[in-house]
Amino acid sequence: MALNNIWVFAQVANGAPTSATLELLTKARSLSSNVTAIIGGDGNSAAAALGEFGATKVYAVDHGSALPGVAIASAMKSVIDGGETPDLIMFPQNYEGRDVMSRLSVKIDKTVITNNIDIADSGNGVTVVTPIFGGNTLVSTSFTGSAPYLAAFRPKSFAAESAGGAAAAVTAVAVPDLGSTGGASVNAVHVEETSGPKLDEADIVVAGGRGLGESASYAMIDELAQLLKGAPGASRAIVDAGWVPYSYQVGQTGKVVKPNIYIAAGISGATQHMVGMKGSKNIIAINKDKEAPIFGVADLGIVGDVHKVLPKLIEALKGR
Amino acid sequence: MSPMNVIVCVKQIPDPAAPGALDGATNTLKRDGKLILDDSDAYGVEMALQLVDKAGGGEVSLVSMAPNSETSGLRTALAMGAAKGVLVSDPALQGSDALTTAKILAAAIKRMGGADLIIGATESSDGYTGTVPEQMAELLGLPSVTFAKKVAVEGGTLKVDRQTEAGYDEVTCPLPALISVTAGVVEPRYPSFKGIMAAKSKPVEEVTAADLGITPVGWAGAGQQISNVAQAEARQAGEIIEDDGETFTKIVGFLENLKAI
């Protein structure tokens, strides 16, 4: 089928479209010449960048302090009810993306395929590719039935490239009455991000896991990251244990990182972690257990105690 | 204080410590071994038990779906303190997509008479589609707060710290509602011996998809079809060395080669 109309769920952070948004727009415009970005807020500040990366139209949904999921999905449904049928709706695999696509999938009774890293339109069917088992197996799944097809993509699945397009025209779409499904509202926003390079944009990431033994040992990760001008990261285990904030988490439920160098210290390499860092160009792993799965993806693996290796490494780097 | 009834959605999954495999004939995840309570769901069960305890009354019920009559994972949650469970078990459920799963669970929850609060995990540890809780909220006509990392109920209103990309948001939401909780929201208790013994006689009602009036299910109901399964390109094997006290120099050399230092 030809993809005559693609919608992309777009997001803004710090006044600009997120990198995941620009990645999806870049892919969308390679599949169709008619790409619409659906965005929360008034859309005006983002229209230029959204247009530059391939959006021809913007539907802006001002949902006020309401949690965006149900509000934006309801607005999308109202546009569909109004007679416009997108062939494909692309979502980023993140918090708001998940909420919007889940609500919309019920509203229009369509399945949604999540966790994808690629999409292709063969002319007679749309197929998405999903990595499973920590990324060692790739499953291709075709949509059956009629459009719209709903698909979510992991961050960094596509490279964002400017198309040099003009600012997209913004149309405001009102949030319909949410009835009993409304009512969840945001009262305060807290930011926990660290100074220094952002985890998912850093050239070097130093991540720590359970092998550090105790929360205080995470200071070594911070220090090493600082020396290398990289970002500190963490496995889910130590985030769950409360050693570091969730914004540090690398993995399936955390951030996907693809730095030039990834240093995994005391991380065994559970599937949940591997899917978030396997795309790193160079991987160094330090772990006591030589059977740890992380060594299967490491370019340099040190079978040893992080408490012995890291202090010496830090000293050596300080002395340079 | 008014009593609070909570329904927790739990999933029974193959032991994550064992390597996963796909059934060659159907390309679905093999679930023929022993199934256990998904770790991710233990947090929701614990959260529910604590909320009911704070409310001073009410009970925690479980709802689950499985292609066979497996209940071992449910028994774990019952042993933690849940009062009863409903298991939707039907061979026709094999291959159901997330939307169908949500329809089944939502219908089961309606049949149970609903609750003040429905709790799910953010995603399962085996399929990790991550859409089922929010889909259920829509099907049940409820407001929802996903990715809850701290939950309290005050004066009939939910107060939730919800995880975001950058930190967290403080969110309020009227009841009844649905939430999905992150791992780490609370520390799950270990079932006591007494709890394990008591769980054996707690009621688990088994129903079929037809009992819930849901058709079609399984592959017939999925809006998707697996067209290919392939191995990903493996990474080149790296150099693995035992630490002898000097391996830090290897790391320094590696970083130098990449001009990182």
Image (tube, coloured by chain):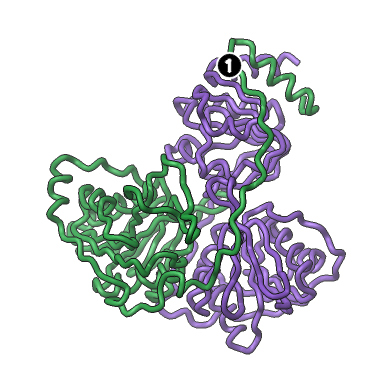
Any idea which chain is the purple one in this picture?
A
Reply above or below: A94 against B93.
Answer: above
Residue B152, by quadrant, is bottom left
Q: Locate residue A192, reporting x and y percent.
A: 56, 45
Any idea which chain is the green one in this picture?
B
Q: Locate residue A25, reporting x and y percent.
A: 73, 65
Reply above or below: A79 against A257.
Answer: below
**Looking at the image, which is closer to me, B90 or B189?**
B90
Q: Which residue is mark 1?
A: B242
**Looking at the image, which is closer to me, A208 or A111?**
A111
Q: Residue at x 56, y 70 (%)?
A: A64
Reply above or below: A169 against B242.
Answer: below
Residue lying at the far top in this picture: please name it. Answer: B245
Q: Residue at x 50, y 39 (%)?
A: A270
How many dots with numbers?
1
Q: Is residue B175 left or right of residue B59?
A: right
- Few, some or many residues within 10 Å of mark 1 (<14, 14–19, 20+): some
Q: Is residue B57 left or right of residue A299?
A: left
